[in-house]
Image (cartoon, rainbow, N blue to C red):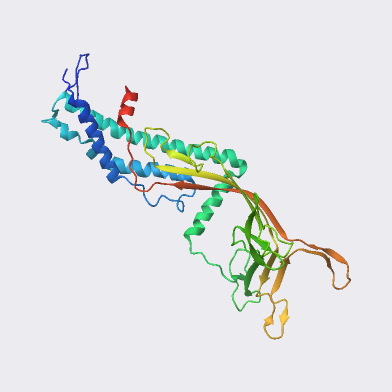
Amino acid sequence: MNLDSDNCDPKTFDVTPPAWLKGEAKDAVDEINREIRSDVHLSPDINYLEYPNPADAMRETAVDITNKIKANQTRYVDKDRYRSGGRYSSCSAKTISQVRKWYVDEVLYQVNKQYMAASENINEQIDANFSESANDVRDANNAGANLLKSVMCFPIGFTMKAEHVRPDGSHFEKDELAYWDENVTLGVNIAPDYLRHDKFYDPEQNIWIDAVKSGKRYIADPAQNPSSETFIPLSLQNVNIFANLSILKNGGMQVLPPSPSTAWVATTNIWKIRVKGRLHQFHLYDFDNECHPHPIYGHEAQIYSREDYVDIRDPATGLVVGNNDPIVFEFTTGTFIFVPPGQKELVIDWKKELLKTR
């Protein structure tokens, strides 16, 4: 009873809907899809530099898309189109209006559900694969993103000001006996410099040598490599965490669509990276150090050196005091990537979802 009002009296009736009703409902949903496709685009502020952890990007994406849909929700539903004089124009008009309302609600529900679930899954994978280092890996990616956002430069030396201060941190005045300050300029020189890739390094010639394929292996090009001292200065191993969890050829995890009923919105991936390397030479220079006087320049730089020298001897006694070993390092870290599709549509297969609600 009163099916054309907001306060109907529910009873059971055998109703045969008009043949045109299904087509009209589909047209209404297609219209909403076109409007969402035109209105809703992922904010360009949601990117790797701002959200290096894709789990954070997922949450922000859910908020961004949800807010944009809610801002136009009344227009998408367009309830007034199906009403006249405070009532629905007909039972069929009310049905189409309810389908529109359901569809917009379903889009909002799916966006929130799928993105939040993806965010939780990503964090679980990071915690599972990096264990106690998970937060360190997240911090490292945040630091890397902050570095990329800043103006990168490679100064010859980094100058710091050293000065004598009181225990509370306050400064002595220049006329006080305890006052002093000086600049400390530090410079670093390493070999190899790790700014090259897919190369071999020859420490005797201090050159990089091209890699050539020999069977299934890559070796230093013999034409460029008369030295037997060539070594690979940096070893890398990338482990794709989602490799066995994804149907994608690149091993990424499709965040949306997690089911056939949702539109493709984003892909993410996580790699565990193991790094092992050695610095053939490492020199740290203190250019402002005044401990080594020089008759022309005033003083010489103090140099801390790490190279592959054995049997370092005391110049006064000639006795061996130790070896000078090159710096070696090994660590495990991780990196994430979140790939949005750009201006893609956000569409739900309304027929499949309507069948599920039945």
Residue plotted at (19% across, 23% down): 7
Rendering coords of residue 191 (x, y %): 66, 65
Front-most of 10 and 117? 117
Rendering coords of residue 136 (x, y %): 58, 48
Q: Is residue 266 shown above or below 176?
A: above
Rendering coords of residue 9 (x, y %): 20, 17
Q: How many labels, in total?
A: 0
Residue furthest left in the image: 85
Residue furthest bottom in the image: 296
Left or right: 83, with 261 as reference point: left
Left or right: 148, with 278 as reference point: left
Q: Is residue 197 shown above or below 113?
A: below
Q: Quadrant of residue 19?
A: top left
Q: Quadrant of residue 93?
A: top left
Residue plotted at (33% across, 42% down): 345
Residue plotted at (28% across, 45% down): 39
- Of the 4 image quadrants, the one containing the C terminus is top left
Rendering coords of residue 29 (x, y %): 25, 34
Q: Quadrant of residue 322?
A: bottom right
Is residue 4 in sight in this rendering? no
Q: Is residue 288 shown above or below 119?
A: below
Is residue 111 in sight in this rendering? yes
Left or right: 88, with 204 as reference point: left
Q: Is residue 106 shown above or below 292?
A: above
- Of the 4 image quadrants, the one containing the N terminus is top left
